[in-house]
Amino acid sequence: MTDLALAFSPLAPWPLLIALAALGVGALLLLAARGQRGVGLRALALALLLAALTDPSLVREKRDPQKSVVAIAIDKSESQNFGGRAAQTEEARKALGAALAKFADIETRVVNVTNDASGNDGTKLFGALAEALKDVPPERIGAAVLLTDGVVHDIPGKAESLGFKGPVHALVTGHEGERDRRIELIEAPRFGIVGKDQIIRARVVDTGGAGARIPISVRRDGVALATFSPVPGDIVNIPVRIEHGGQNVVELEIPTGTGELTPFDNKAVVAIEGVRDRLKVLLVSGEPHPGERSWRNLLRADANVELVHFTILRPPEKLDITPAHELSLIAFPTADLFGRKINEFDLIIFDRYSNQTLLPSVYFENISHYVENGGAFLAAVGPDYATLRGLYYSPLESILPARPDGALLELPFRARVSKAGEKHPVTRGLAGAKAEPPNWGEWFRQVDADIVKGDSILSGARDKPLLVLAHEGKGRVALLLSDQLWLWARGYDGGGPHVDLMRRLAHWLMKEPDLEEEALRASARGREVSVERQTLKDTAAPVMATAPSGAREEIAVSQSEPGLWRAQFDAKEMGLWRFESDGLTALVNVGPPNPREFREVASTTEKLRPLAEATGGTVRRLSSGAADSVSMPRVVELRDANRYGGADWIGIRQTGASNLVGVEIAPLGLGLWAMLALLGAVVAAWAWEGKR
């Protein structure tokens, strides 16, 4: 391919040459007006002079023609797996590739576009298209053909943003009038205060439906809560109580409609992180002792604890006739604390409180009912627990996990983590526990008791139970069989991990999920799921995984440390996964809670139409009616045109692009012949004028 062109390389600036030409033409016109002879020869000489000053050249370019590039962007996102879309796409790809292969001047580039690992960015065809064509000059791009369901999430607002001038054609899979139901989350809280309601605002969209009410089933951590039946399109407010700290997984689900495209988007998941506003603690001290202030200081040091502390030294039936205006102390509000307001406390602590005659039996019964209904109770007992004046010989007997045998062990000892305690999250990994002996200070007194329920996680003198934990009804109880925790707080003999121990103990009593001794947990990072089984048993049963589609798979777990069994699992599906083992259930959402890819799955031609028509391209469905058979348009080549498509054809722009491989330059205003022509014109003009 050779191109011939005339090029100029002026020896003086163009404005100067134009001015010189204007002066010369003016002078010639003046001479012609006076009838001067030889004006034509003078004009020829001037023209030759100006031509010499512009230095004209003949340029011959040798070019290598380049093929036009046609990009085929194939949508392989997860929404393309519905119905017969994948088969339609593959059939169209083969037919389009065969049609383009017939053109010798077209190079085809195929771009496969999938969702990112999270799936929350949706289908980004144009980003992948730009990446695939970044090494191609814009003038070489003849067209872009998109094989997609039409639900694309990065459509440019203007055709100029594409970076090329070729047409964009969209061949859309699926069928006209597809039906699909889905739940749209309008507002979903990320955090909530434990014990309070959070509002989830959602609506049901029923594409192709009749507008009838559709029930929404609400579940929290797999437990059914309520059902709402809104009209499609109406926003419904769904209250959800935050029951515990950590993740509260809320599922919203609607039934599958007749002829619905997919049930995948009939479910929405909201993970609400439960946080405690303030921990309200009632601390009741009995006989004064050196550790009483240690408990108070420990609880006061935590800004999240609202402490109510009373010391009871006098029975309620003992009346005081001192006039009220002379009293410096207030009367103990036993009726309020242990009656009407007992359920307002998150945790009740009895510190060396023993003589049950100071409180009527009905108040101890109230505490028992409080625990059985979900409350938390901690007793740190002293020598009185070993006597008939101890708490065990009161209505609290039904909830206390250890029965005193009447003996009091008064000898130096170091607390040790028991075999069960090595597996229990309250004591597992306490600093200094693995040393022999434990790197903790000594205690000198312990009540000898026998466990009647629960687990001993710390042992003391003569390997007797020291700290016992037990479940009682819906609540929990902890019993510390010594009153010398304060020695650790004072740093005696090096002290001990009293802060970590008491904080973990309080959180276990408050049912924090991370401190459950029997628990199944799952967490996801991308598509990799970590499954963790916490247990006090010697072995852990396999975990059964249920995918969002209902497929089930058994996962074997292996022990990573005492009480903890773990496994890694690669999730092949996005959505809510359910894991079950030994009657325990864990839920985890793989990918974003509500992937953008599945917020709208009905195929459409309308999203891509404005952009395609702005580039001169077309948008059409591959299949008509209910059949999945593909009807492909013809492919033709066109030079620059306003429209590159018709009823049964799509056009590819002929770019005419080429690479320059050589240049030959022949100067016209230089050399012997140019000089002779100029001198000849000047001499002829002079001679012609000389004849006169």
Image (spheres, rainbow, N blue to C red):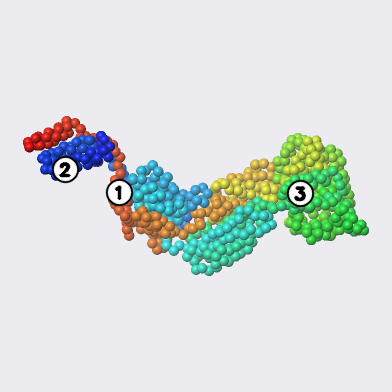
Residue 469's tag is 3
Name the spot of residue 446 as percent of width and height, x first. Answer: 84, 43
**Callout 3 crowding tier (Cα within 10 Å): few <14, some 14–19, many ≥20:** many
Report helix, strand or loop for mark 2: helix
- Going by the numbered disc 2, the residue's amino acid type is Leu
Q: Disc 2 designates what residue?
A: 30
Most extreme residue toward the left is 691
Q: Is residue 372 visible?
A: no
Name the spot of residue 11 as percent of width and height, x first. Answer: 25, 34
Q: Judge from the rendering whether residue 31 lies leftward or rightward of residue 279; answer left or right.
A: left
Name the spot of residue 42 as percent of width and height, x first. Answer: 14, 38
Q: Disc 1 designates what residue?
A: 654
Name the spot of residue 687 as percent of width and height, x first. Answer: 9, 34
- Going by the numbered disc 1, the residue's amino acid type is Gln
User: CA gap, disc 2 to disc 1?
Assistant: 54 Å
In the rendered view of the protein, which quadrant contains the N terminus?
top left
